[in-house]
Image (tube, helix red, strand yellow):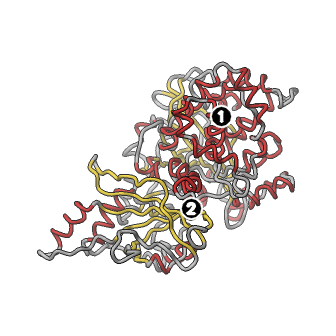
Amino acid sequence: MSVNGQSQVPPGFRFHPTEEELLHYYLKKKVGYEKIDLDVIRDVDLNKLEPWDIQERCKIGSTPQNDWYFFSHKDKKYPTGTRTNRATAAGFWKATGRDKIIYSNFKRIGMRKTLVFYKGRAPHGQKSDWIMHEYRLDETSATDTIATNSMGEIVQEDGWVVCRVFKKKNHHKSLDSPSNSSITTITKSQMLDSRNDGALDQIIQYMGRTCKKESDSISNDMRGLRHFDSVTSGDRFMQLPALESPPLLDHACSSQACYHPIEAQMMRNSETSLTNQGGSISNLNPVYHTGQGLSDWATLDQLVASHLNGQTDTSKQLSCFSDPSLMFSTSTHDNDLQLPQIRSANRLYQHSTQNFNSEIDLWNFNQSSSSSSDPLCHMSNSSV
Amino acid sequence: MGDDNVNLPPGFRFYPTDEELVVHFLYQKAARLPCQPDIIPDLELYSYDPWELNGKALAGGNYKWYYFSRRTQSRISNNGYWQPLGVDEPIISSSSGKKVGMKKYLIFCLGEAPMGIKTNWMMHEYRLSDSGTSSRTSKKRAKPRESSKWVLCQVFERNDGSQGSFCDNDQELSCLDEVFLSLDDDLDEINYPN
């Protein structure tokens, strides 16, 4: 059975290893010079491979892939230092965030580093959508393997890592959808221009802005986030004019007594709910009561929808573009659009004679419909 | 999990696309062609509660279960029923751009309709689209009703807060990574003001 040649992988099957499998099976074998049955994960010289070439180099069979795997040997940037050289001809991989500890049966087995590919040269690189998760074994477990396999030889061979590269989901795909004929040219050009980071960024931005009024500690935590207000040179928030409506926010702050506690709750929830994708849907539900403008609504709709749908196939149902209030939301979101659409249909049905700008009505309506803790009640209301 | 019947190395799992489910598995089932590999079992209507599927249906990646069932309107199990949600979604073939099937969303409710209590169990029920079946079967004139009798069910539990290394890193960045990623430029400015 060959994998990198003609595909023998049966239909429907994909290489989706767990982090534990990557570390404990594949990388451990690699480090221990054990033979790996199938040549699924190739060796790659990271410095000589641009991310857009990885796809061809690391494909498994002929099934479409969203992520690619390879082994890489870390090269030192400087002979004496510990930093790794991850530059290619066209750019460089830059670490982001904190390394994540990978556990197996509650035992720490390795670490995961997240890197982003920047085109150009530091510090003026241009951030791309290419992401890499670089997994390394913990020194202890790596040396264990070596000790058992190397016949007494002490081999200082800790440089192998296993990497997963994928492209952060973008929204160009939705442009290919046949059902987008109702999108106006303006929206289209906005979508083309926007290399946005999706709903989450908007929520963060929204939180960052509103948390100015929160306690100092939270404001400090979010200081970096407020920065987003001033990001105008980038093309990431092109689609956000609807959010930039201070009168609306001021109004909301002053008139909604429940605003601040809920805001705080949302911030508290955000980390837990966001780390467990697909979780904590009900936690976010109370946010609907804040009576924000429709654009914020749409953002939250998306969040709930993306949580509900998880990794549902992204078949595009862009008919909700005909709803002007949701136009912006769908353009920033590439997950399954089924739920927002249902909800918008629901609203249209319930409010067919009312102005969409009437926040209060929407608020009342949604308060009643989201009184249950189950966010799906919106959908069931609309189903016949 | 999932790869019991197929001899594949660790890491390979059944992660079919909607299109594969319809075009590969459902069409072959309807046309009574042998499925290769024949891994998705037939289960009698909807008599099983979703939590009974383990060991009976095919376990795919991400804790999803797959089985064929006869097409019916009453989706009643021992302890509850499946209630349709929203509108059905067409499955479009990526090669031809044509509609090949339909996908229905359902939620499992405990008790008797319509008073049941909603659970976290969800189903995507795939069926061949009417136009698809008729054009396919018109050549052979095999009874069209017969051919569309099967549906393919994908059942999963929407997990609220439980973790798994799967959900965390599947296809997308974890949202926390997204946050760090978005902060990256700002942090640079903070760390290296010059």
Helix, strand or loop at label 2? It is helix
A68 with respect to A254 (left or right)? left
Residue type at tag 1: Thr
Residue placed furthest toward the front: B194
Q: Quick check: marks 1 and 2 in contact, CB under 8 Å?
A: no
| Residue A75 visible, this orientation | no
| Residue A183 visible, this orientation | yes
Marks 1 and 2, Cα distance to the nearest angstrom? 50 Å
Helix, strand or loop at label 1? It is helix
Residue A305, given in percent of the width and then of the height, sits at 62, 41
At horizontal 72% and vertical 22% (from top left) the residue drawn is A254
At horizontal 40% and vertical 58% (from top left) the residue drawn is A112
Residue A305 sits above or below residue A353 on the image: below
Residue B54, given in percent of the width and then of the height, sits at 39, 43
A153 with respect to A97 (left or right)? left
Disc ID at residue A288: none
Residue type at tag 2: His
Identify the residue under disc 2: B24
Chain hosting mark 1: A
Residue A190 sits above or below residue A154 on the image: above
A296 with respect to B160 (left or right)? right
Residue A37 sits above or below residue A255 on the image: below
Identify the residue under disc 1: A210
